[in-house]
Image (tube, helix red, strand yellow):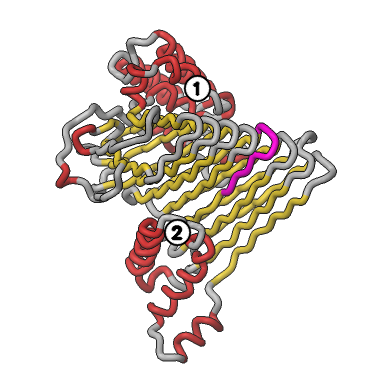
């Protein structure tokens, strides 16, 4: 990190540390202080760091971001509405209670903002915050520790099922450019509980900004959780997300991540199957065009026997866009009898687009069943010709083929309204690209 950036972030932290959420708690201030020091030691990753060689972030050294303060927002300004029972709205890093609807929840469920939970449930936050993250290797997570403003806090008690999905809207509505927003989510799923979470990240203007999200998931024995993340922020922003999961015996998590927005985006997913019989499933796709760049890194660690992991991820790139995927599954010595599969398929819509993919598999146990693979290719010209020969216009034919390409992923989305929403977003983005993005 440059000396200018080093001094800038140190000064910015000194300016904001006493007005950020939880500043009255000494234990949280210690976390913030340590987070800043770790970030300043690591700096923004460059090409010499293997996991970042296709997506270096050193250009952030030269940008002087600021931390936005909480401001009132009217319901009319929201780009996304819902009829669901549980709907939480966050704007520029802060929870907006007047725009949110907690709804009726089963007994014992805690659904609130992290800032509120620090006050109302400080012991639980203190005991679980930073439980799943390796900060010595995660500079953006360390930066989040220093500047985290607000986010989701969810605790689902033992044996409780939340029947309706919990929907979250994160709106970037900055009045000026170079706003830096740090969300921190903490989700605690007790034994044999069940819940579904849907996150929407959107932007309403053309200002540049930097969104940095860290989500921690702690699943106890037999817990089940479905999690959807849709990122469609404006085309001038930078979005970095880190999802960190710890799974107990026989727990099950289903992750879905869909990336369509931001000029530069990065998703890091770290899942630890720490006890026997734990299962995880990761599905998703990205669709980028113009000069967008997106990078998804997933790592699954099988630590104990009879675990199961499944990864299905697809990418679509047009114009001069770049896509990166790296998935690593590690089967540790004690993880006998585990099953793992990983598939990454990618579609190029332009001769100028670029996709880099690297699925990895490391096995240190001798009684497992694992597979992985990846493909990168252009749109099938024979299929396109066939559709056009049947009287289907070229634009409609391309739309049908792209939809067919991602159908395998969308079919796994259990929420019908969300499946339809994603399909519509994808078609709108494809149509907005026009003829300049195609081969």
Query: Left or right of 345: which side holds 209?
Result: left
Answer whether residue 290 is visible to the viewer in this image: no
Coordinates of residue 258 in the picture (x, y in percent): 45, 52
Taking the image as shown, residue 101 lies to the left or right of residue 423, namely: left
Quarter residue 64 falls in:
top left
Which residue occupies the foreground of this view, 2 or 418?
Answer: 418
Q: Earlier in the sequence, mark 1 or mark 2?
A: 1
Q: Judge depth for marks 1 and 2 and give the one in front.
A: 1
Q: CA distance from mark 1 to mark 2?
A: 34 Å
Secondary structure of the residue carrying tag 1 is helix
Q: Residue at x 60, y 40 (%)?
A: 51
At 43% from the left and 79% from the top, the residue drawn is 397
- How far across and how far down the image is residue 210, in percent? 36, 37
Residue 75, above or below 292: above
> Residue tagged by mark 1?
128
Number of residues whose C-alpha sits closer than 10 Å to that of mark 1, classed few (under 14), some (14–19) or many (20 or more):
some
Q: Is residue 334 above or below residue 339?
A: above
Q: Is residue 207 magenta?
A: no
Q: Position of residue 204 (x, y in %)?
A: 24, 48
Whether residue 423 can be seen here: yes
The stretch of residues the image draws in magenta is 274-281
Q: Residue furthest right?
A: 366
Residue 3 image position (x, y, % from top left): 45, 22
Local packing at callout 2 (Cα closer than 10 Å; few below 14, some 14-19, many 20+) is: many
Residue in view at x 58 percent, y 48 percent? 281
Secondary structure at numbered mark 2: strand
Specify the label residue 409 is tagged with. none
Residue lying farthest top?
26
Within the magenta stretch, is there residue 279?
yes
Name the residue tied to disc 2. Answer: 287
């Amino acid at each position: 990190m440059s000396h200018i950036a080093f001094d800038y972030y140190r000064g910015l932290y000194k300016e904001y540390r006493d007005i950020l959420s939880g500043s009255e708690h000494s234990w949280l201030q210690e976390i913030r202080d340590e987070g800043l020091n770790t970030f300043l030691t690591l700096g923004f990753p460059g090409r010499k760091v293997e996991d970042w060689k296709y997506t270096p972030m050193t250009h952030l050294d030269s940008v002087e971001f600021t931390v936005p303060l909480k401001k009132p927002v009217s319901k009319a300004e929201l780009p996304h509405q819902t009829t669901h029972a549980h709907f939480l709205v966050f704007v520029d890093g802060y929870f907006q209670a007047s725009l949110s609807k907690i709804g009726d929840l089963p007994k014992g469920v805690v659904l609130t903002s992290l800032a509120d939970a620090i006050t109302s449930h400080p012991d639980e936050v203190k005991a679980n915050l930073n439980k799943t993250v390796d900060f010595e290797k995660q500079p953006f997570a360390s930066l989040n520790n220093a500047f985290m403003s607000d986010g989701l806090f969810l605790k689902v008690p033992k044996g409780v099922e939340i029947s309706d999905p919990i929907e979250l809207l994160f709106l970037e509505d900055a009045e000026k450019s170079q706003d830096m927003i740090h969300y921190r989510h903490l989700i605690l799923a007790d034994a044999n509980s069940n819940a579904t979470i849907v996150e929407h990240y959107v932007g309403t203007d053309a200002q540049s900004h930097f969104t940095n999200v860290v989500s921690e998931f702690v699943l106890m024995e037999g817990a089940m959780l479905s999690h959807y993340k849709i990122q469609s922020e404006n085309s001038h922003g930078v979005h970095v997300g880190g999802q960190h999961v710890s799974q107990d015996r026989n727990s099950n998590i289903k992750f879905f991540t869909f990336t369509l927005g931001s000029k530069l985006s990065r998703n890091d997913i770290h899942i630890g199957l720490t006890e026997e019989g734990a299962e995880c499933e990761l599905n998703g796709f990205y669709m980028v065009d113009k000069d967008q760049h997106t990078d998804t890194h997933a790592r699954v660690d099988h630590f104990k026997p009879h675990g199961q992991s499944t990864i299905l991820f697809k990418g679509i790139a047009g114009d001069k866009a770049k896509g990166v995927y790296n998935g690593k599954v590690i089967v540790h010595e004690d993880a006998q009898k585990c099953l793992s599969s990983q598939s990454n398929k990618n579609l190029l819509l332009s001769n100028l687009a670029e996709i880099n993919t690297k699925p990895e598999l490391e096995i240190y146990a001798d009684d497992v069943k694992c597979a992985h693979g990846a493909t990168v290719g252009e749109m099938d010209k024979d299929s396109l010709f066939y559709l056009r020969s049947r009287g289907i216009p070229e634009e409609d034919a391309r739309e049908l083929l792209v939809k067919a390409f991602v159908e395998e992923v969308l079919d796994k989305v259990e929420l019908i309204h969300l499946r339809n929403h994603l399909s519509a977003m994808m078609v709108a983005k494809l149509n907005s690209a026009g003829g300049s993005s195609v081969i």
